[in-house]
Amino acid sequence: MGADFIFSINEIKLTKEEAYKKANDCAFNSRQETIDTLVNECGCYHLSDDTTSSETTSSEVYKYLIECLDNVYNYQSFRDCSYFIIDGTRKFAITGGMSWGDAPTNSYESFNVCETLGLTE
């Protein structure tokens, strides 16, 4: 076994403000489903309390999603992120690297959360 190359890509279709509204919907209208997705698919175990998320409030989820969105929309501020454009108009933010079971970059978790929940599209 060795290291694997993993990456996360987010298509930037929405403005940051529109993405915030989508995060608000995830946090307040479908909190439990969002937490389950974050814990089970993204490995965000800090949002759960011994496999039950009853202690995690909608405000905490929203704050976490906003932090993730800020990282994705500020990708140009990080040396482990970049972007590319397809068809002259479709912008994608990307981060990735080699992993031995850990996050390959400091911003990977944020990118992965936004990608999994589709917050930027």
Image: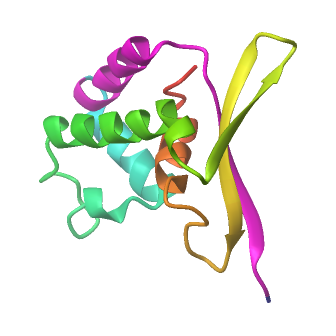
Q: Image check: 95 left or right of 17? A: right
Q: Quadrant of residue 101?
A: bottom right
Q: Nearer the viewer, residue 19 or 38?
A: 19
Residue appearing at x 49%, y 27% in the figure: 119
Q: Image check: 4 left or right of 102? A: right
Residue 55 appears at what percent x and percent y? 12, 53
Residue 8 highlighted magenta (yes or no): yes
Residue 107 appears at what percent x and percent y? 50, 53
Q: Which residues are magenta?
A: 2-28
Residue appearing at x 29%, y 40% in the figure: 32
Q: Is residue 85 above or below residue 88?
A: below
Residue 72 appears at what percent x and percent y? 50, 36
In the displayed image of the protein, which residue is found farthest to the bottom? Answer: 1
Residue 95 appears at what percent x and percent y? 64, 49
Q: Is residue 30 above or below residue 111?
A: above
Residue 50 highlighted magenta (yes or no): no
